[in-house]
Image: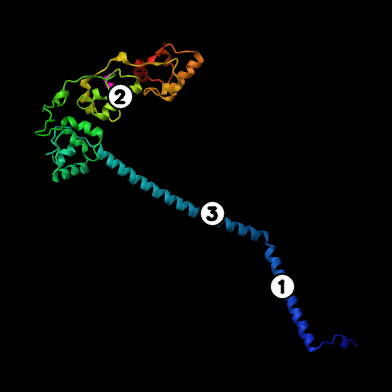
Amino acid sequence: MWKDFFYFTRAQQVGIIALAVLLAVAIGVNVWQARVQHVPPGALAADTLFVQEVEAFKRTLQSRDSLERAERERLWAERRAKYKLHHADAEAEAYTLAPFDPNTADSLAFRKLGLPPWMAGNILKYRARGGRFRKADDFRKIYGLTAEKFDELKPYIRIAGAEAAVREQPDKPGNPPAVPPDTAFVVVELNAADTAELMKVAGIGPYYAREIVRYRRQLGGFYSVEQLREIERMRPEHYDRIAPYCTVDTTMIKRIEVNRAGIDLLRRHPYIDFYQARVICEFRRAKGRLDGMRDLRRFREFTGQDLQRLRPYLDFE
């Protein structure tokens, strides 16, 4: 009877074997998944360490790229600085002003006057095409020539046969340079002259005339001809040329009412910076008023030189 109960046909035996195989495979897959999902602590730590090492390596690469980029930028900055220094030295090369005829001067003569090589070449090309300078103001049309440079050169332009030619005078130490005859003895008062009057002085062209008026307005007036040296781009030789023909009337100076002026008005003066203006206002707020220059001497913001040049511009009434 038992034999009949456990008796299977051939087809049933094949099905049982197939089912057993499937069960074995399923159990094996479950066991494998369990092992994969349950990672031992040591293995997890090892994986974390590996990830950290990879990230550190990536950072190393990024740091190396940053260093290389920084080095390239440094080298480029050095080359750019050398380029600027070279050209600045070339522009700052010393030159000597002397009488010249723009219709006959050669390239070397123009270079000695402070003109760059490319500008000298342009002048020679202009002349080669038949161009000619008939009066001093024609030289103003040279491409790239600044108004300041033209004002500097104009008194030295000598055009043979032109009505605008200026008379020759020897340049001797202590004597003013050669100037046009109609302006040789013109003297202007710096605190009253407008741009038109200033331009009557040989060596003062439109640029310097405007700068003198602008700086005079900022100061409130000049108390010394020496203050012309403070004007932007005023070269020593240019100052020496125009100073003998300038005077100042100090009674025309507009003074600052120190005990009433606000911080904005004070700091607009060329000789007063923000910190000096602020300390004046704070002292007034605390003490009421300043009685004179001696009060300013208490502040470290004012040096002796500051007080000396400010004295003509401050009113303590």
Check residue 43 in the rendering and tell me which mark sits there, or answer none.
none
Q: Residue at x 33, y 16 (%)?
A: 253
Whether residue 227 is in magenta: the answer is yes
Which residue bears the numbered disc 1? Answer: 28
Give the residues drawn in magenta, as a range: 224-228
Q: Residue at x 72, y 69 (%)?
A: 31
Q: Quadrant of the N terminus?
A: bottom right
Give the number of the mark in front: 1 or 2: 2
Q: Residues within 10 Å of mark 1 (few under 14, many from 20)?
A: few
Q: Quadrant of the C terminus?
A: top left
Q: Amino acid at mark 3?
A: Ala
Q: Earlier in the sequence, mark 3 or mark 2?
A: 3
* Residue 73 in view (yes/no): yes
Which residue bears the numbered disc 3? Answer: 56
Q: CA distance from mark 3 to mark 2?
A: 66 Å
Residue 72: horizontal and vertical position, in percent? 39, 50
Q: CA distance from mark 1 to mark 2?
A: 100 Å
Drawn side of residue 156 relative to residue 307, left or right: left
Q: CA distance from mark 3 to mark 1?
A: 39 Å
Predominant secondary structure, magenta span: helix
- Image height of 18 relative to 146, above or below: below
Q: Amino acid at mark 1?
A: Gly
Occupied quadrant, residue 39: bottom right
Occupied quadrant, residue 33: bottom right
- Image height of 44 relative to 200, above or below: below
Occupied quadrant, residue 104: top left
Whether residue 183 is in magenta: the answer is no
Q: Earlier in the sequence, mark 1 or mark 2?
A: 1
Check residue 213 in the rendering and tell me which mark sits there, or answer none.
2
How many numbered marks, from 0 up?
3
Residue 228: horizontal and vertical position, in percent? 28, 24
Q: Residue at x 74, y 81 (%)?
A: 18
